[in-house]
Image (spheres, rainbow, N blue to C red):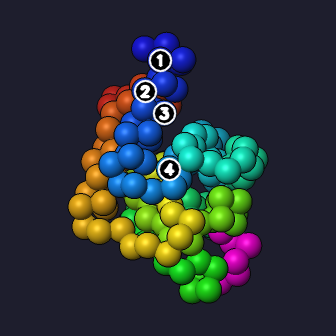
Amino acid sequence: MTEIQEIKAVIDVCDQLKQQVGCDFVGLAIQNRVGPNVKWHYAVGNLNDKYKRISVRFGKGIAGKIISTGVSMMMVNFPHQAAGKVTDYPIALAEKLNTCYAVPLFFNGIPKGVLLVGNRENRSFSDSDQEWVNNSGQALEDLLRDYLGFNQGDS
């Protein structure tokens, strides 16, 4: 697959997820190959291009926390119920998200990416919504494995 086909395939998965779950925003963050920082690479339903400039440290922000723990995360009523400083959640601020659900993407068993769905209105994500996000995350893992250089034989 060429890089253009790869990007289109990723955007298609994100678009389909956005429609299926009925959310306002879908974003994909990936940890840099070198260093601990995590960047948002793809988004659908975004208000602007700020997401492209967001880079968070491992363990910080939604993406950094998901990658450092390897567990999914639900955030509701942002910024009122945010754990820590509001500025620790730049993607939620940039996209004016009120509620979001994010899952880790694993490559060779190691969390290296994050798939996030979000809403600008107060709304919870049902079990079936969460299942859609999890399944889309697995589809993205398969799509991005070669592109990111995380082939099965790599260490």
Marks 3/1 in contact by CB < 8 Å: the verdict is: no
Q: Quadrant of residue 52?
A: top right
Q: Position of residue 148 (x, y in %)?
A: 50, 31
Label 2 vs 4, first from the N-terminus? 2
Q: Is residue 79 above or below residue 145?
A: below
Q: Is residue 144 visible?
A: no
Q: What residue would you read off at disc 2? A: 9
Marks 1/2 in contact by CB < 8 Å: the verdict is: yes
Q: Is residue 17 visible?
A: yes
Residue at (49% x, 13% y) in the render: 2
Please report the bounds of the magenta region as a residue range: 83-89
Q: For this view, does 56 lie left or right of residue 65?
A: right
Marks 2/3 in contact by CB < 8 Å: the verdict is: yes
C-alpha distance separating marks 2 and 3: 6 Å
Residue at (48% x, 24% y) in the render: 8
C-alpha distance separating marks 1 and 2: 6 Å
Give the amino acid type for the residue marked by disc 3 in the picture: Ile
Badge 2: residue crowd in 10 Å (few <14, some 14–19, many ≥20): some
Q: Which mark is residue 26?
A: 4
Label 4 vs 1, first from the N-terminus? 1
Label 3 vs 1, first from the N-terminus? 1
Camera-near label (4 vs 1) is 4
- Mark 1 residue element: helix
Q: What residue would you read off at disc 3? A: 11
Q: What residue would you read off at disc 1? A: 5
Residue at (52% x, 46% y) in the render: 28
Q: Is residue 38 above or below residue 152?
A: below
Give the amino acid type for the residue marked by disc 1 in the picture: Gln
